[in-house]
Image (cartoon, rainbow, N blue to C red):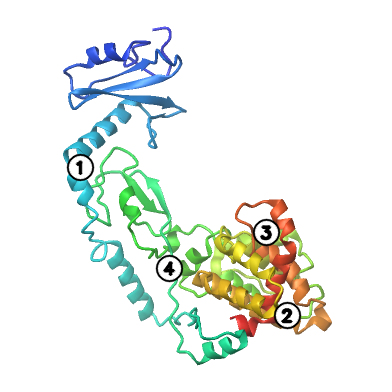
Amino acid sequence: METRPKYYGREFHGMISREYADELLAGVEGAYLIRESQRQPGTHTLALRFGHQTLNYRLFYDGKHFVGEKRFESVHDLVTDALITLYIETKAAEYIAKMTTNPIYEHLGYTSLLKDKMVHRLSRGRTEPRRVTFQKDERISSPLVRRSALKDTPEKQCFYEKIHNFKVHTFRGPHWCEYCANFMWGLIAQGVRCSDCGLNVHKQCSKLVPSDCQPDLRRIKKVFSCDLTTLVKAHNTTRPMVVDMCIQEIELRGMTSEGLYRVSGFSEHVEDVRLSFDRDGDKADISADAYADINIIAGALKLYLRDLPIPVITFDLYSKFIQAAKIPNADSRLEAVHEGLLQLPPAHYETLRYLMAHLKRVTMFEKDNLMNSENLGIVFGPTLMQPPEQNALTTLNHMRQQKLVVQLMIEHEDVLF
């Protein structure tokens, strides 16, 4: 057939009507053909016989065949997967609707494995994460009084919640959902897998799984550009090791360096530090023997913070901090910043707290390094805060507020954290 596209075979029947396709397929369950649409020439329809009727689907090809999300190497595989899905959804619709109502997630599979991992980690005598308080007391009006009250309040253990990073996955061989314990059907893309911890579930079950992802270090391919919470959970630390190691190195030998954080290190050497962390993790050598110029280490720290997929001050809280910086009354402004800090994810809060304490110490050497809180605010404002829409004009318009937020956090670090 001259009009047959090269990626179709004998199943292509040219430009025929829907009624004629129905006649050709009548009485043969599972039979199918492809026809060119009479209404829209150049487009193609998959006609599939199932349940004593002919079902018609708009068929696409972009190197693979698809009618929905799943993409197949051949039309035969697409039809096979469709028949499996149609059969299960038709014959077991009531069962599918109920299969998430009594999950085994809390008793089997990933959750048990997670508990075993935590017991094993605790048994190794690792230091417990720092305890930080994220609660506010509505009766306290003054930030200074509030800080005093926070110190006198019994501190609460900080649990780092992390949502699973699910992606569509094709499983080889039979697989069962680790949330509902039911079979995952289909030829390809039968379910989703968390790329951080490896949890396998149905797509519909993924919406019900708790935010308890415990990343597996074997699945974390790099340190830079990795989600902050993912990294600290994978390494079982309070903060990213990059932040700790760089700050410790800077405080050891760079606090009096003129223009600290403002002067750029040689970009190729900063890139070397990034590669070293990605390759060696907490074994990376950033000592003076490896990098004599402390600006390289400072540059690597800024690069790490700037490249986070979710900034330290998260996208969803960005506008809250910008609006706080616009408040004319100093006490109210400080209080609004504090309210925003309390809403940060724990890993982000703890990273910011540690960084601000460090920058406060940097300002104590202002006579030598010429870096006061305002200068540091100019440097770190765009690094720690980025607008959700990633608009250069928005960033430019908010530079003053970004600088002021960081400046306030440095100057009032003892009050705000």
Question: Mark 2 or 3 closer to N-term?
Answer: 3
The reply to whether the C-beta atoms of the residues labelled 3 and 4 are less than 8 Å apart is: no
Front residue of this view, candidates 156 and 232: 156
Q: Quadrant of the N terminus?
A: top left
Q: Amino acid at mark 4?
A: Glu
Question: For the point 61% across and 62% down, which residue is it?
Answer: 319
| Label 4–label 2 contact, CB within 8 A | no
Q: In 3D space, how far apart are the residues under numbered discs 1 and 4 (Cα atoms)?
A: 34 Å
Disc number at residue 161? Answer: 4
Query: Which numbered disc flags the more N-terminal residue, 3 or 4?
Result: 4
| Residue depicted at 55% across the width and 70% down the height | 348
Give the mark nearest the N terminus, 1 or 4: 1
Front residue of this view, candidates 403 and 320: 320
Left or right side of 166 for 33: left
Q: Position of residue 369 (x, y in %)?
A: 81, 78
* Separation (CA) of disc 2 from disc 3: 24 Å
Q: Nearer the viewer, mark 2 or mark 3?
A: 2
Q: Amino acid at mark 1?
A: Ala
Q: Determine if residue 85 is in view.
A: yes
Q: What crowding class fits label 2: few (fewer than 14 Cα within 10 Å), some (14-19), or many (20 or more)?
A: many
> Which tag is nearer the camera, tag 4 or tag 2?
4
Front of the two marks 1 and 3: 1
**Residue that numbered label 1 is attached to:** 93
Of the residues under marks 1 and 2, which one precedes in the sequence?
1
- Residue of label 2: 362
Q: Are marks 1 and 2 in contact (CB under 8 Å)?
A: no
Q: Return the disc, 4 or 2, that comes first in the chain's sequence.
A: 4
- Callouts 1 and 3 close, C-beta under 8 Å: no
* Residue indicated by mark 3: 271
User: SS at mark 1?
Assistant: helix
